[in-house]
Amino acid sequence: MRALATKLKHWWHRRGLQPAPALPFAVDCVCGKKLTGVRLATEQIIRCPACAAERFIFPRSPLPAPHGENATASSPRPTYALWLVPAAAVALTIAGLVVAYRIFLAGTGNPETAQARRLPERLEQVRKYLRAGSFRRAALEAKAIAASGLAELPRADQKAAGQLLREAQLFGDLVDIGLEDLVERAAAATDEQEWQLDFVHRYDRKNVLLDVIVRQDGGSYRVTYPLRAGMDEARLEVSELKVMTGLDLERPRRLLFGASLASIRAEPPGPVWVVRFHPDSGVLITDAAAAERCCPAWGDVDTRSLLEAQRNWARQLP
């Protein structure tokens, strides 16, 4: 490729050194005499030898003469020569693209293998977004990774990567109102059907973060969390959350987790206002930096120790 460029450079240099062909002119003077000569590279003024009148003569054109014009000049340059430089430029561009392809893409194998090499970097970027508090960006990247799957990662790394992606999507789509205020709003609604329609439109599948005490009681779970709906009782129902399966909750434990809302409505007996969640949405929080970014009160030593313990629990969950 370098040799080709050198030859083009020499050819262009030699082409520029070739003398321009002579281009005669013939103009009539005001006295009727015919004035002749050769056009120069610059304009010229000639004097008529008969009447001494001056005439302005244009310089020769820098463009090549059309075929058949200026028969006394050297033969016109072949048409293909005009296309030589553009064609050479195209050839050089194609050659450069081929070289770039071989350098950057050759040996990567199929697209899935190339993606597998990039996947750890993408996961690390999600982690950086989370710890910087850029939850929306973390969620968008996590959603894109989840859509393409984690099968290219070693099996031992897939669970940790899946946990990271779930946490990122949890933090990236939190409800914009406190859970207590949301339950109060449900209880204050005068039209139950209108409230349910409003809930589906604004809050369904939106995520909430919970700091609760949970204890398993037979087939259900008792949750200690201060929650009321005006003068009525209210409670969280977490028995349907699959994340609870496999946790040792025979004695009360503090848990920090998130889940997406499924419903808030008054249920018998009582009635009692019950907050329910989508079963597959429960996520244990394990990233201390992200948790503290979201809730500064979770930056204390006890909470950090709990999050470390939850990281170990998450590895054991099915």
Image: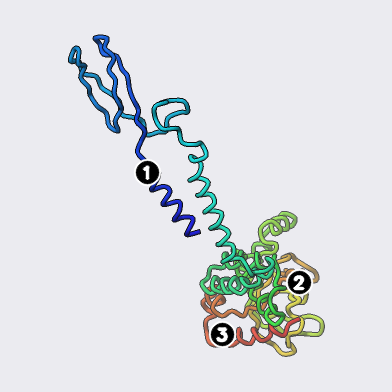
Measured along the vertical axis of the image, is residue 113 above or below residue 74?
below
Check the picture and name the quadrant holding the C terminus: bottom right
Work out how far the residue at label 3 is from the one at label 2, CA to CA, in angstroms: 26 Å
Q: Residue at x 70, y 72 (%)?
A: 150
The reply to whether residue 233 is visible in this rendering is no
Q: Earlier in the sequence, mark 1 or mark 3?
A: 1
* Residue type, label 1: Gly
Q: Which residue is mark 3?
A: 304
CA neighbours of label 1 inside 10 A, class few (<14), some (14 to 19), many (20+)? few
Q: Residue at x 25, y 11 (%)?
A: 30
Horizontal and vertical percent position of residue 271: 77, 69
Horizontal and vertical percent position of residue 284: 66, 78
Q: Give 113 or 5, whichever is nearer the viewer.
A: 5
CA neighbours of label 2 inside 10 A, class few (<14), some (14 to 19), many (20+)? some
Q: Residue at x 42, y 26 (%)?
A: 71
Q: Nearer the viewer, mark 1 or mark 2?
A: 1
Secondary structure of the residue carrying numbered label 1: helix
CA neighbours of label 3 inside 10 A, class few (<14), some (14 to 19), many (20+)? some
Horizontal and vertical percent position of residue 140: 61, 64
* Residue type, label 2: Pro
Q: Which residue is mark 2?
A: 279
Q: Earlier in the sequence, mark 1 or mark 2?
A: 1
Secondary structure of the residue carrying numbered label 3: helix
Quadrant housing residue 228? bottom right
Q: Earlier in the sequence, mark 3 or mark 2?
A: 2
Work out how far the residue at label 1 is from the one at label 3, CA to CA, in angstroms: 76 Å
